[in-house]
Image: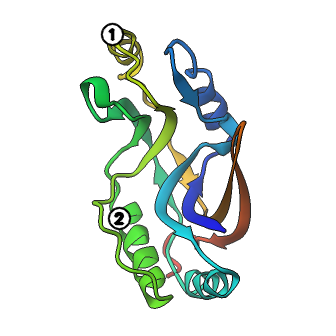
Amino acid sequence: MRLFVALPLPEALRAQLGAMTAGLPGARWVAPENLHVTLRFIGEADSGQARDIDAELAQVRAESFPVTLAGIDRFGSGARVRTLWAGVEANSALERLYGSIEQALQDAGLPPEGRRFKPHVTLARFKASPGARLSDYLARHAPFRAEPFQAESFVLYSSFLSQSGAIYTEEAAYPLGPAGTL
């Protein structure tokens, strides 16, 4: 199974982001119910690895913290734009949680993540450049800023790729403790 770790988003925030999913030709928009802040993509894992991953993630201890989404941007440039995303404001608590998750996954036998952590919510993917319409879209939506939400858990998801898009299933949720308790 394909696995990843993420922060789930509140329903109202998913709806707010979902309202921006139009106006770009060739965009493969992420369904609002699938929007999340990716903490770590794991990839393919067999059932034994998945159990080890779950056991290590269950040991992660962190406090609940506020998260603010701000800004809309893209990965790639020119004809090589691949992804449209909503950014996450710098957050030391999120960085610490990411570090703890990364260590837990390495303890479960996974290699270290090779990419720098850039927390974001993927809104759309592109097979081909959306062209000049992307500049117009970014000009309208780049100032986006959501009300903060409280991250109260992180989740291990499995992902199944279908013709109509990815189907995510929550495999396990790991609560974050109240502030000041850890």
- Callout 2 amino acid: Glu
- Dot 1, crowdedness within 10 Å: few (<14), some or many (≥20)? few
Q: Going 42% across and 25% down the picture, which residue do you hit?
A: 128
Vertical relation: 140 (above or below) 21: above
Q: Going 33% across and 9% down the picture, which residue do you hit?
A: 132
Q: Secondary structure at mark 1?
A: helix
Vertical relation: 5 (above or below) 85: below
Distance, label 2 to label 1, CA atoms, is 35 Å
Q: Which mark is residue 95?
A: 2
For the question of whether residue 129 can be seen, the reply is: yes
Sequence-wise, the earlier of marks 2 and 1 is 2
Residue 181, image x and y in percent?
53, 79
Circle 1 is placed at which residue position? 132
- Callout 1 amino acid: Ala
For the question of whether residue 147 can be seen, the reply is: no
The quarter holding residue 11 reads top right
Vertical relation: 136 (above or below) 33: above
Residue 135, image x and y in percent?
32, 14
Residue 113, image x and y in percent?
35, 70
Q: Is residue 11 left or right of residue 24?
A: right
Q: Of 126 and 169, which appears nearest the observer? A: 126
Q: Going 61% across and 64% down the picture, which residue do you hit?
A: 2
Q: Of 174 and 169, which appears nearest the observer? A: 169
